[in-house]
Amino acid sequence: MDKKKAILEAAVELIAEKGYTHTSMQQIADSVGISKGSLYSYFPSKEDLFVSIYEHYQQLVFERAFVVGLDHNLPPYERFAKQFQVQFEGVLEYKSYMRMHMRSESAQNSEKLKGLGHRMRGRLFSWMEQNLIDLYGEDIGPYKWDLMWMTQSIYTSYTGLMTSSEDEDQISPQELGKHIVRQVDILANDFLSGKSTPLLDEEMMRPFSVGMDQAGAFTSFEKREKAWEALYKSIHELNNSQYYIAITDRISEESRKSKPDEIVMKGLFHLLKEEEMLEAKAHILEQQILPETKH
Amino acid sequence: MDKKKAILEAAVELIAEKGYTHTSMQQIADSVGISKGSLYSYFPSKEDLFVSIYEHYQQLVFERAFVVGLDHNLPPYERFAKQFQVQFEGVLEYKSYMRMHMRSESAQNSEKLKGLGHRMRGRLFSWMEQNLIDLYGEDIGPYKWDLMWMTQSIYTSYTGLMTSSEDEDQISPQELGKHIVRQVDILANDFLSGKSTPLLDEEMMRPFSVGMDQAGAFTSFEKREKAWEALYKSIHELNNSQYYIAITDRISEESRKSKPDEIVMKGLFHLLKEEEMLEAKAHILEQQILPETKH
DNA sequence: TATATCATCGACTCAATAGTCATTTTCACT
DNA sequence: AGTGAAAATGACTATTGAGTCGATGATATA
């Protein structure tokens, strides 16, 4: 199964550089060091490989923000900024994937890819909506489409900026997260003060809102996300939740590193499991996060 | 020469719909109703055809904003908004081209296209810079990169929105122009009040600023633009400039229509040519704008 | 009508590459 | 060592489509 990941990585690298159509299966196979025939035993077609890349990386980048969003110990403003921050960190980490993504190219052909893109857009909007409500309450309703549109356009453009520059650390994800939230806040306050009138409404945004959960909630899609969600939920039901939240945040932080320290994670999970009420949930998450250790 | 335009239009339509790689020269030829061989007598290669599309349409959309920018009778704020407006009108008019453009795809291969894109980006930034200075004076200097980046990301995303929806007139270009300038104004004032710190600087933006004129001026690239510029300049040297500006604005308005009324234009040019000082410049512009009428 | 010039045509070449499959290699287990 | 299943291989097929080129037709001029 690790071979599959190696193929995905090699393919991303090549496609980011030369584009989908100009990257042949042969080149990908050569780059991984296997034959074309083997390649086809892992992925039934080129398109399928491409879709798998999206499934793999999109989840990876977005999940960070999801998990940070679960930590309701941070105040809304800081939480929103932190969510941007971790997402930008993801952007830097998976720069090649982002570059590939930015080229869009070929997003048209595959029905599967269209569906995937649509769902992701839905999640993005749902995520933004949740944050806006956390920040400004339901009053923001009439302006939320304008704000969300503005937010995503700013987010996307900064992603492009980070991705385009070759040298690392030109812009700090933390700074950028704060910056974006600040801009959004300024615009939101202007709307709330009644000085600007909104331009967009649900009707116009329908292509983007389909796929959003009816309640507009920030829903999770993947098993791993569900596991995080369940754990945080259980913690909040405890009395001394602070302690366990601190531990869980630490796990979250560690898991975002490119090379998480397994021993540290194991220890942290042990701390969680001491509390009987958390044991089950912590175990499930641990299974999801840690690679299956032999024996 | 009209055939060439027909080819460009057919190609844009097809490429917008199916993408560059999935549109064959044969299909384009069929769509125009000529043979592949003939196609190659107009354009030496597929890539060349593609580049020509960009050259043709990019200029068409951007030129509108340029010409409006020359009219210094409008106050800066309204002028900026109007420039966005006419550009969005262009976006609606050349929706297929815009769709094609949005797909980005293939921008990588051609050196020529890279150069073209680079130059256009330079013009866009130069244009925004000029408008920011007109609006806020030189004080805006330290914040201009952040503002320009924000502006272009908002502009781009609304362009995408207009382009994606099938039915016309969901959003009014005029409304949208005002809207964008309003958002930019809010952010600019926040910067100027010292409440926000900028994140971007010249260094980071170098990839986008190369190609901008050293003086940062909003320079013209094409003969037609030069002609407009020269005419406006001559008018401003006159005493009773108001009258001639009104005429010229009317010409500009007419020329933006999809089917400009040639007779009206001819009449308007005649009015300009009455003034001896304008005769030459007006004539040059007329040559550039009006299709060569037989005899 | 004859001839020269130019535009148009479409059958053809040729390179690229997605996907297949018979053969070979690897390896676990006797 | 021997055996058989599973994995890996790469030569092969089939298709697509960019670009070519000699043949054909149209137009203008003498």
Image: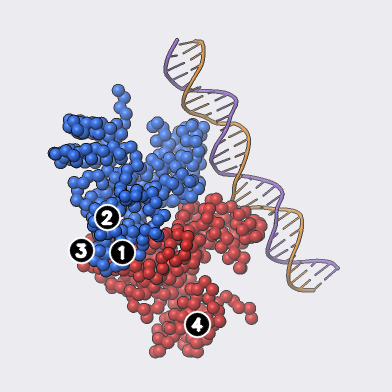
Chain colours: A blue, B red, C purple, D orange
Chain where mark 3 sits: B
Chain where mark 4 sits: B
Image depth: mark 1 or mark 2 in front: 2
Q: Amino acid at mark 1?
A: Leu
For the residues marked 1 and 4, what is the alpha-carbon distance in whole angstroms?
37 Å
- Mark number, residue B282: 4
| In front of the other: A74 or A194 | A194
- Mark number, residue B63: none
User: Is the same chain shared between marks 2 and 4?
Assistant: no
SS for dot 4: helix
- The residue that disc 3 covers is B195
Q: Amino acid at mark 4?
A: Ala
Residue drawn at x 20%, y 65% as measured from the top left? B194
- The residue that disc 2 covers is A132
Mark 1–mark 2 CB contact (< 8 Å): no
Callout 4 environment at 10 Å: few (<14), some (14 to 19), or many (20+)? many
Residue drawn at x 15%, y 41% as measured from the top left? A242
Q: Is residue A161 visible?
A: no
| In front of the other: A189 or B42 | A189
Residue A267: % across, % down: 20, 31
**Which of disc 1 and disc 3 is earlier in sequence?**
1
